[in-house]
Amino acid sequence: MKKLIYFISVALLFSSCKSTTSKTVVRNPVNYDDPTSYANTITEDELKELLHIYASDDFQGRMTGEPGQKKAVEFIKAHYLENNIKSPLGNQNYFQDVPLKSYKTPEVTLTLNNEELSYFDDYISASAGSTQTIQSNDIVYVGYGINTENYNSYQDINVTGKIVVAKFGEPNNDDGTYVISGTNERSKWSNGRQGSRSKRDVAKEQGALAFFMIDDVMFKRYSAYYKRLADADKSSGLSLPREKSLFNFFVSEKTGKMLVPGFESTDEAQVINNKILLNYKSTELDVHSENVIAYIKGSEKPNEYIIISAHLDHVGTNDRGEVFNGADDDGSGSVAVLEIAEAFQKAVKDGYRPKRSIVFLHVTGEELGLLGSAYYTDFEPIFPLEDTVANLNIDMIGRTDPKRESENRNYLYLIGSDKLSTELHNLSEEVNTKYTKIEFDYKYNDDNDPNRFYYRSDHYNFAKNNIPVIFYFNGTHKDYHQIGDTPDKIQYDLLANRAKLVFYTAWELANRKNRIVVDKAEPQP
């Protein structure tokens, strides 16, 4: 009898609603100036539920191209389908294919003045080239191999089609300061891998055919690493498709002295008579991975885009089969983007469609060198980069940095907010003051930060294209890239509040009258 009374009551209620709703439309009492009710749909419980699935052992550490990563992209896609958030790719296709290459140890012989050098002992290939034979009777030494506004190693020398040799480091003034910076601070040209890549890129721009970097520290590091991979018959990693016009090697100090006698004491560019024969055979395999992309089309300025990003991959499993769950890195960012997207969609259902389009971008291959975001910006941007207003990138926002344990736990490291747009930085501060009241720590935003975090997550591929960015980051901890980065260690109250901050910031960017101004654009090559 109680059930019958209940169903009769429900029927009468719906009958009453039907007779009135045709006359009066009740609208949610929220406006574009107060998105709080939508931000509050981002909850600790929902984030926890999502992350305990996404960072579970079932996803096998989400290594790029592996079965666990395929489960991850399907999980993300299912969330967007469930919430009726569309894909710009159409036909329920949320995946942007990212073609990658996997390289094993190449077959290389290098003869210098009729003496064959030893791979792993004297030199190592630092990046894949094409299968080719190179023969030359001379090389070009370019000292530090730097080309900047105030220092050019290539001045008055032509290296087109030549074998180029450079050494580690950068020049000093007589007073001991560095020429590039004019201070006691080293520049990127002395910064390990970044310095080596920068010098390699300059050599390529100058038309070099092959590039040898004399750097004993990097040579020993790469040689030991690649030898372990070769002994285990493993790939050296994945990379994006690229032009194979430059052979790139690290050589030992001993080999450096054979190539350029006395290189330690001279920076002067010079041609050196050295007979070189290089036989190089590449070994590569095709690997396919995916970025996942969804969006909410803007109502007034649909061709202007705010991109909210996080990387979907992690580092897989170890040799014992233990899973690197990556709950913080970057499971926290991944589920935050899902919840932010859901909050925006709820606003749309209530009639508050964002004025600009919001793009939700989950990128692959971040752990292997920002591959998915580089593919999006450098190969196949789904939306024009010139129409992209800003990138809000979330990478690790679920825990606290042990260095801050004695301080306010309600903090967040912000990186990059002021690099390209003063307006973005100010907007970010104002939004936080109004809504989330997180303590912003700009420690890692310093240009001289030795960690170089500004260059180490996916926002950088947008920033290098003069798109304003904010990188949201809680800092590293003892479980960073360890099997201990599990969902039970996430501080879900912090994760929820930090995700709300990103939502509020995106809301303001999307709905303000004018697009933010880029007042600190970097010259483009």
Image (spheres, rainbow, N blue to C red):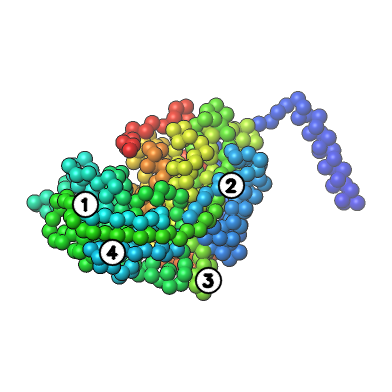
Q: Which mark is residue 111?
A: 4
Q: Earlier in the sequence, mark 3 or mark 2?
A: 2
Q: CA distance from mark 4 to mark 1?
A: 17 Å
- Whichever of callouts 3 and 1 sits on the residue coming sooner in the sequence is 1
| Direction from residue 369 to residue 204 in the image, left or right | left
Label drawn at residue 140: 1
For the point 61% across and 64% down, the residue is 58
Mark 2 or mark 4, earlier in chain: 2
Label 2 amino acid? Answer: Phe
Q: Residue furthest right?
A: 1
Q: Position of residue 265 (x, y in %)?
A: 12, 58
Residue holding disc 2: 95
Classed neighbour count for the residue bearing mark 1: other residues with Cα under 10 Å, few (<14), some (14–19), many (≥20): many
Q: Quadrant of the C terminus?
A: top left
Residue type at mark 1 is: Val
Q: Which residue is tagged 3?
A: 322
Crowding near pointer 2: few (<14 within 10 Å), some, many (20+)? Answer: some
Q: Is residue 21 left or right of residue 75?
A: right
* Callout in the foreground (1, 2): 1
- Above or below, 132 against 35 in this view is below
**Foreground residue among 352 and 4:** 352
**Count of residue discs:** 4
Q: CA distance from mark 3 to mark 2?
A: 28 Å
